[in-house]
Amino acid sequence: MGFFDLHEPEDGQDRFFLYAMIILPVCAATSYLFDAWYHYTHSDEERNYQGLLSTIVIVFSYLQYCAPIRSRKALTIYFLSVCLITEAATIGYLLYYIKKKDITNIIFHVSSLLLEILFTSALIYCRVVREYESHIVVENKHLFHFMSRLEVILTIFIPVYVNVKYTSLTRNMIAYFLLFDFFSDSYSRFQGVWIKSALYLFATTTTVAVATEWVYFNHHEHIYEQVSIVAELVSEGLCDLIIILQFFPFHFKTQHVNNIARQALLIHRNLHASIANPSIPNGDANETSQNGEIKGIAELVNTSSSNETELNTSM
């Protein structure tokens, strides 16, 4: 794994976890590719595989944003590879719906193709060009949390997939429920209207997509299916937006607080060093302390002002 030049494990992580964070998004995208083209090649059969596998694991494809790869070249190749696999899968479903002349799903999958390109481009810009770090960090416990929640949710959705009356292919709604729960853990650190609004809208559209899907299964009115598809498309865009916004530090309170804490610690160390240094006369020591304190306060004011300016600009 030397080619990837992995980051060192942080708290709540280990080497196995780092490898998993690279492999799981690829596995999720590959399962999506398999489901899409299997369905396309077997769509004329009376009963066929309905995309359950990719629906289960598709959530991991969204975690590619925090792939622990330091090499900029390797990270670019990684993002592009996942994107190409996902796009190839979406094209498989798109061809199927073109054959069926289903306008709603054609629009949905064409839009998904465009969103995936925009999402990958934004990931490359943030992680490779700007070298931003993720502020919503994934740890071991989150992976196990995803798995435990999947067990509960799938007990509700599996009957839909095994029922011959329905044709429910790969859907992202389960992934969005899990991701909304994951993102909401960091809500207390959010600041600014953009990322908070995106999270609220993401939760709303995901709920609408699931609710209208179940209404469609019970009443078989296609208007509910169309509403569910549109809501899922909007949820996809909002999910991508939240992932991109979390790269920018001014959307989080911790960045501002940490800057002040570091400056305060620096002032304390400078004052302590100037007072404890016996080579400096008392008058000079006092003057040095005062100058250090004034300089530190000025830096704090400048830091606070710059942060407030960034926040106002972002809002």
Image: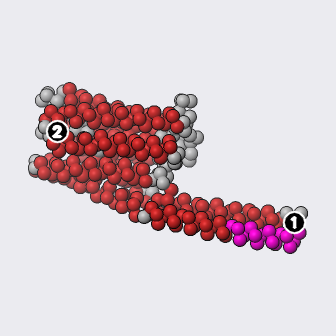
Query: What is the magenta segment's predominant secondary structure?
Result: helix
| Number of on-image labels | 2
Q: Residues within 10 Å of mark 1 (few under 14, many from 20)?
A: few
Counting from the top left corner in percent of width and height, residue 17 is at 50, 39
Q: Is residue 290 above or below residue 181?
A: below
- Residue 115 vs residue 256, the one in the foreground: 115
Q: Nearer the viewer, mark 1 or mark 2?
A: 1
> Which residue in the protein does label 2 denote?
167
Q: Determine the CA span between mark 1 and mark 2.
A: 82 Å
User: Residue placed at 34% from the left, 38% from the top?
Assistant: 57
Q: Quadrant of residue 272?
A: bottom right
Q: Is residue 212 visible?
A: yes
Q: Secondary structure at mark 2?
A: loop
Counting from the top left corner in percent of width and height, residue 121 is at 41, 42
Magenta span of residues: 281-296
For badge 2, the amino acid type reads Thr
Quadrant for the C terminus, please: bottom left
**Relative to 37, 243 lies left or right:** right
**Relative to 141, 109 lies left or right:** left
For badge 1, the amino acid type reads Ile
In the rendered image, residue 51 lying in the magenta stretch gets the answer no
- Residue 167 vs residue 105, the one in the foreground: 105
User: Residue placed at 51% from the left, 40% from the top?
Assistant: 68
**Relative to 171, 104 lies left or right:** left
Q: Is residue 155 visible?
A: no
> Which residue in the protein does label 1 denote?
280
User: Residue placed at 49% from the left, 49% from the top?
Assistant: 134
Q: Residues within 10 Å of mark 2 (few under 14, many from 20)?
A: some
Lower sequence index among marks 1 and 2: 2
Label drawn at residue 33: none
User: Residue placed at 52% from the left, 67% from the top?
Assistant: 308
Q: Is residue 216 above or below residue 6?
A: below
